[in-house]
Image (cartoon, helix red, strand yellow):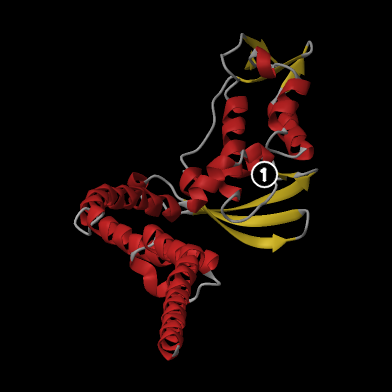
Amino acid sequence: MKINTKLSALCIAAALMSVAQAAAAAPAVTAPAEATQPGIASPAAAAPAKVPAPAASASVTTPAPAQAPSVPAASAPATVVDSAKAATPAAPSAPAPRPSASVAPAAAPSVPSTAKPSKPQQPSTSVPVAAAAASVKPTQLDKLNHESAIPLVLEAQSRYLYAISGGSTVGESFQWNGKSYRYLSEDIGTKTKLTSYLTQAYTKQASEQFVGKFFVEINGKLAQLDADGGNLLEFNRATAKMVTMTPVKRSYLLTVPYPAGTKQANEKITVNFEKVGSYWKISSAPHIIF
């Protein structure tokens, strides 16, 4: 009886031990199997599959999506550096001086080209008075001074000589009151035409004084004594000095030389000017000046 009791107790104990061992072995195997499949195996497999190198960045699991852009951001500067390094040898400093050297000779010829016009500009500025006098017609002189007075005097002399010589052609000669006369050319053949011609440079009063003294009117045509006049004075070399001045009247003292070969002293002639409308005219009669 005692032996059976001991055997049964041993059997129960062995069964319990086997059950305990089985129970202990079963949870130890199944529990980690279930834990490794959903919780550990999948992330462990995903981590090395996606990014093997940046495993250190996986220390922060929550910002994993944020780390994904951070990883290319970290790799981006690497590529930029690589591209910069590649760009540096691609465009080295060696070709830079080559185009600069090609530009230098292009700029070199431009220097003498700019130096050339500077030379003609100097003489052009050295004669501003002559250029200004040539640009203004003497018969339309609105500003009178000691320089512009001379061109007007020369214009007046030219019109005086044209009229006193009879015009463009010598007209028909005839005898009148015992003296030889000739008609003026058609363009100045009447008193109206001659006066209009002279008043381009003279005042009307000075023109009429000259016409009344040297010309006669016969049958509506102007005639003059068949003779020539004039002197040797060179008015083109004359100088003028203002003597009197008002807003509409001025007087200039002209120093007029003779030709160099004559060895005669210069003549001093006073010429009066008057402003008629917008332009200056000579108010001295032609025969008084010339």
Residue at (45% x, 50% y) in the render: 257
Quadrant where the C terminus sits is: top right
Badge 1: few (under 14), some or many (20 or more) residues near its Cα, within 10 Å? some
| Residue 265 at least partly seen | no
Give the quarter of the image for residue 139.
Answer: top right
Q: Is residue 120 above or below residue 164?
A: below
Choose between 128 and 157: the one closer to the eye: 128
**186 relative position to 1: left or right:** right
Q: Residue furthest front?
A: 1
Q: Residue at x 60, y 57 (%)?
A: 253
> Which quadrant holds residue 249?
bottom right
Between residue 87 and residue 109, name the one nearer to us: 87
Q: Amino acid at mark 1?
A: Leu
Q: What x and y, as percent, mark residue 122?
A: 38, 54
Tell me the residue that label 1 is attached to.
141
Q: Residue furthest bottom?
A: 2
* Foreground of the two, 183 or 186: 186
Which residue is at 66% across, 52% downward? 144
In the foreground, 142 or 200: 142
